[in-house]
Amino acid sequence: TLSYNSIDHLHDASFHGITNTAILSLNDNNLRILPEKVFEGLPLLETLNVESSYLQTIPRNGFRQLPELTQLTFGNNSIDMLHPGTFRNLSKLEILKLDYNKINLIQEGTFEGLLKVYLLYLSNNELKTLSKNVFKELVLLEYLELSYNMLTDIQVGCFEGLQSLRFLFLNSNKLRSLSARLFEGLSSLEKLNLKGNQITILQEGNFVGLSSLYQLNLSCNSISTIGNGSFHGLQNLHYMDLSVNNLQVLPTKGFSDLNYLETLYLQTNKINMLQNGNFDGLSNVTFLDLSANNISQIIPGTFNHTDMFYLETLFLQRNKLTIIHRDAFIGLDMLLFLCLYSNQIHQIEDDVFFLRNLRYIYLFENNLTDITGNPFRSKVMKELHLYGNEIRTFEPESLTTIPVKAKIYISCDSLFSLPINTNHDKIQCVNPLSLPSITQSHVIANALKVDGFNCTKIQIIDFYTCKPCEPGTYGDTILGGCHSCPVGGFFQDEIAQTKPSQPNWKIACKLCNEGTYVKAGHGISAKDCEVCPEGTNQSIAAGYRACYCKKNYARKDRYGPCFICLEEGLDCKQEFQTLLPGYMWDWKIPNANLTDYKKFVDNLQVENDSVATHTNYTGEMPRIFECPRTESCPNNNDSITGNCAKGYTGWLCTNCESSFYSVLTSCVPCPSKAILAIESFVFFFVCGLTCFLLSWQIKRKTEKEMDARSFIDVLIARVKILLGFYQVIGEIFISLHDVNWTGPLVIMGKLISAFEINIVRLFVRPRCIDDKLDLNPKIQFIIGATSPVVIFLIPFLYYQAKKLYVYIRFTLAFRLSLRSHFENLKACFFACVIVLWFVIYPPVCSVIFSLYPLSCKTFPLNHDKTYNITRLRSDFDVDCTGLRAYHISAFILTVAYVIAFPAGLLLVLCKYHLRSSTDESCGTDDPSFGNDDSTTASLNINSANHLPTTTPPPPWLNFLSENYKTKFWYWEIVELSRKVTQTLLITLFGWEDRLTVIITTCISVLFLLVARKMFSLTVIFINVIVAANEFPEEHDDSISVILVILNVIVLVIIAGELLVTIVVHIKHFGIISFVAVSIRRLRASAMSKSD
């Protein structure tokens, strides 16, 4: 056997070399396709089982090499088609099982060659029609299982050639009618099951040819009409079930052809009257069930002209009989067992039961009140069951005609006096809790146990003792037997009840008053119902629990109290605790058991009495945490644990799944490889162009060019403004999770990320290339820590290498002539290093701060806070355990870079400022130091006015002092301090910390007051206010739009300034002159490089 493995593939001749194998089992594997020659090399194989292995098809020629195969099983797979000739070479096959598949069509020739098959299973498939001659090759077939398909049409001739067929199962299909002569030729058929179809009418010729049929099941259809001659040809039929149909009137002489019928079930129809001729021809019927109909009267003589001399058992319980007339049962001389319980009988005429063989009469649960006259006259009666009637008087004279040894069971609660007869002492007073039992044959017992009785087999002999379902229980008409009324709002104070008091509840128990329930179940009266526990809704029926919970209440015990859901993020609409969108919890705590809780939740959702297990949860509930971004945690898959949105994963759904990358707080699908390559090329091209323009600006030599503020100067100034704005806004927006970064807003997020200088993450997107290249905070820290060193080393090593090359290759005189060139090169490299250090300063600080000890956040997973996890704020999937080395390194880098870099810049700026004693004032005397948002003002500022003309500042210093007046020479360091302070607070504490909110807001207000008329700082302030405060969810979209508009306005203003600059240059020089000047400058730059 190779069953219960994970085999997902087999090759041709996989079993070569085991030629003596007789049985091969491949059940419960992951096979989907079998190769054509997979079974080659198994000439002696007799049994092949391939069940539950996800097979989608059977190889057309896969059995050519299996001449000895006798049993073939392909059940419970996904096979949807059988090819004609598939089984052609299996001449010895006897059993073929193809049930529980998806077969929807059987073609003629499918079973060609199966000359010895006697068992064929095709149940639980998707067959809709059966064509003519599909089974004609199966000449020895005895058992055909076609139940639980979707059959709507079976063509005449379908069963042609099945002269050996004995058992045919067509139950649970969708047949609406039976064609005449459909079963013709099935002369050996003994059992035909048509239960659970949609047949509405039986007509003459439906069963022609079934001369050997012994048992016919037509129950659970919609039959409303039985035509005369419908059962013609069923001369050997002994058993027929017509229960649970829509028959209202029984046809006269409709059963006249069933001379050998012994058992007839007609219960649970809509028959309202019995009349003469209904049962003509049924002379051999011994068991007739007419229970659970609407019969209101039995016309005298109904059974008198039927020759029903052998009827022994007659069920008429659960009808609407009110009066039993004297000649109702005349002609039933062999009647032994008569059930009339649970009717509305209030009058019985004399001598009704004076039949020569009637021994057992069941009249309990009726409306009898007075027993007078001789209604029970009998010479052979053994038992008379009258309990459950409110009998007030029982005349002693009525006992004189009842045999002395007969047992009479009666309820004595309403009797005025007990009837006394010295010759009759077998009267017994019984109550619902001490009911008498009935001893009967298995045929009667099988009928009673689905009609409100509990039957137990007597050992050795084939008899059963049956007892009506007592109060506190109800009868199950499907499974049989008695079941206790469940815990909840149910009780039962009557006996042998099978009909639900209300259809919604589906059990034959009465309902407690609203707001009450039976705590232990098995309620026997309304007094057993008690008030539901605290927290429940006591204004409706309790149902299958201790009342339903109030709104926003939950429970941990189906039959216990409910408690209010106070914790934020809980959804208690269905009486159990689950998550609202935007929240998450972790069940991996010692005292919590997710499996048990799921079983309890499943139990709560069951609305029937099959809830005996997992009715409570005794474990601990985890603590709930709010997801930083609500949309990332939709919790919409009906899971207890919650779920992340598509593209999100990790703790609180803060990370991105494979094939997604992060734009601020959103996860965006990775673009195609082609788009990635194009974006990367454009980005690096722009970077190269920027470096070229910067070098060109530095190498300007003429005094006029040094004094004039060029287009490049304006560009640098505007980029500095964007950097100063978005490097802070980026950090704010990362914490501002209410902004819905979807659709066109993703472009805005990309722009902010770009100016936040998350270059590698944004443009290269390594995780879009390979998931292993994901840049977690540790890798980002290493990159951030080494970036300043790499930026310094590359030009330094290049400079030293070039000097060494010149020193080795050229003479001293030539080397002296290159001194100015090396001075300029050094100045250029130094400027590039300072500018790049300046640009990467905030993001490098951010990755350094992100690995401070304070950047770790502790999450107590349980309410007692005894089980906690500590995660890094910048990446909740990173455990802070084992980060000590990173913490120490972060402190070292704080001193070596975060503090040292601006301090060094401040010292150098201070040095040059002290040397500039002859500086002239920059611009006007307005204390505003930049007017960054004023296009006109920015165009009037030039670098010559910043520092003395006698000592031109180096290019990197000019970059730092750009945008500021001379007296505010230090302001760039203040700007850096502002960025670092806000970045530090947001990175370490987030916006949930009140100190972060206060300090960040104060810094924004201070800069807004000091730097008047600066629109960019105003926008920063608004962003801070939005981030620091909570707003109603209905305003989220409006807030997102407003923030994006404000940030776009900043871009428009700065881009507008650049456009105005270009227009001014063109207007001043003319377009041709402007282009010519540009070409000359480029040519001069190229010539200087060649020199």
Image: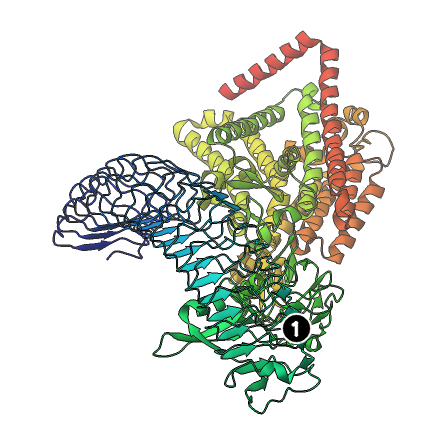
Residue 938 shows in this picture: yes
**In this figure, which colouring scheme has been used for the structure?**
rainbow
Given residues 614 and 679, the one toward you in this image is 614
Residue 249, percent across and down? 55, 50
Residue 103, percent across and down? 36, 41
Vertical relation: 579 (above or below) 448: above
* Amino acid type at image mark 1: Leu
Given residues 334 and 15, the one toward you in this image is 334
Q: Which residue is mark 1?
A: 368
Vertical relation: 566 (above or below) 580: below
Residue at the (51%, 42%) spot, across then down: 790
Q: Is 908 positioned to the left or the right of 422 in the image?
A: right
Vertical relation: 763 (above or below) 601: above
Residue at the (38%, 39%) spot, across then down: 104
Given residues 960 and 62, the one toward you in this image is 62
Q: Look at the numbered disc 1 and give the secondary structure of its residue.
A: loop
Q: Quadrant of residue 911?
A: top right
